[in-house]
Amino acid sequence: MAVRLNPQGSQMDLQLDGKVVFVTGASKGIGFATAKTLLGEGAKVAIAARNRDGLDRAVAELDGGEDLLAVQADMTDPDDVVRAVAEVIAGFGGIDVLVTCAGSSPGGLLEELTEEQWLASLNLKFMGYVRSCRAVLPHMRERGGGSVVLVVGNDGLKPSYWEMTAGAANAADINFASSIAEQYGPQGIRINTINPGPVDTDRWDGLEKAFARDKKVSQDRARELTLSSLPLGRICGPEEVASLVAFVASPLASYLNGAHIPVDGGQRKALMDAKEPA
Ligand SMILES: NC(=O)c1ccc[n+]([C@@H]2O[C@H](COP(=O)([O-])OP(=O)(O)OC[C@H]3O[C@@H](n4cnc5c(N)ncnc54)[C@H](OP(=O)(O)O)[C@@H]3O)[C@@H](O)[C@H]2O)c1
């Protein structure tokens, strides 16, 4: 029998063949890498994002044929989230795995951040994750089980004064995930968070620019400070987060529930903050 290799070249069978996975925020970045990895595992993958062009580009690049479905939806709009979930269920017959990646909290310092920026962060990164779970969990309960992976962020547990809107939303996501893991565990639904540090995506580029602005240093210097905080000496690749998402989502992680797993290379975030005065 031929051995099927996933994009990372692993031979471990994650038993995701034929499972339906819905990934929010997946036209690029971590969500896109996750969709790619899961397609490689034989899953049927639905991806969501707001921008049609971005989705079309992702569909062309992923080349998933009938195993791939793109849904245009805005996770800040409660009706859109419900519609998107219904479209995925109608298209693929159900959802076995939900992965939430749609987030983009602005960087900035307390005295500069506006009311709108705070609310936008909480509306997408916290409430968007709440809405996605609220729409999918009753369906999973009816099916007798499922797995939810919230891609959150290490600043929920390792706060930084220059990324506090993300940190606050992420801490709320982690708390929320613990609560629903307890509530839905008895129904055979596992809920876990994955908490990356800096990951090489457009999102990190934007945050790094804000960090450089607030620190009054160049972006190159901001990158040096970032690297100095990372014991592995490099920023994470989105596919490295995707591998962990795939494992946590899979039946191989069958006893993992209510866990909050860092994938930040052991980042010592304080080193980014401490090097020069703000
Ligand atoms: N990159 C990092 O360093 C890092 C670190 C820790 C945690 N995270 C978290 O990981 C998640 C993914 O980050 P990323 O770096 O992959 O971001 P990214 O490269 O900016 O990609 C974000 C994706 O989400 C979609 N999106 C944005 N707003 C949306 C909305 N309102 N409704 C639906 N989709 C939306 C975007 O497409 P459209 O714009 O077309 O909607 C895009 O597909 C985020 O929650 C982020 O906070 C990232």
Image (spheres, helix red, strand yellow):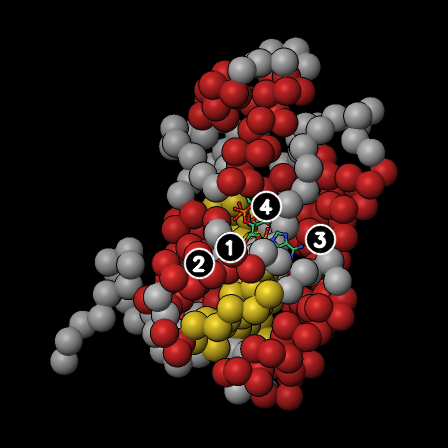
| Quadrant of image for the N terminus | bottom left
First of labels 1, 3 by sequence position: 1
User: In the image as oriented, which residue stretches furthest toward the left?
Assistant: 1
* Cβ atoms at labels 1 and 2 below 8 Å apart: yes
Number of marks present in the image shown: 4
What amino acid type is highlighted by mark number 2? Ala
Q: Ligand 1 near label 1 (Cβ, under 8 Å)?
A: yes
First of labels 3, 4 by sequence position: 3
- Where residue 54 is drawn, which disc sits there? 1
Query: Which secondary structure lies at badge 1?
Result: helix
Residue 147: percent from the left, percent from the top? Answer: 54, 72
Pointer 4 residue: 153
Pointer 2 residue: 58
Residue 227: percent from the left, percent from the top? Answer: 45, 25
How far is mark 4 from mark 2, CA to CA? 23 Å
Identify the residue shown where x is 48% and y is 67%: 249
First of labels 4, 2 by sequence position: 2
How far is mark 3 from mark 2, CA to CA? 21 Å
How far is mark 4 from mark 1, CA to CA? 23 Å
Q: How crowded is the residue under tag 4: few (<14 C-alpha within 10 Å), some, or many (20+)?
A: many
Q: Ligand 1 near label 2 (Cβ, under 8 Å)?
A: yes
What amino acid type is highlighted by mark number 4? Gly
Measured along the vertical axis of the image, is residue 269 above or below residue 104?
above
Query: Which secondary structure lies at badge 4?
Result: loop
First of labels 3, 2 by sequence position: 2
Q: Nearer the viewer, mark 4 or mark 2?
A: 2
59 horizontally vs 146: left or right: left
Measured along the vertical axis of the image, is residue 88 above or below residue 125?
below
190 horizontally vs 164: left or right: left
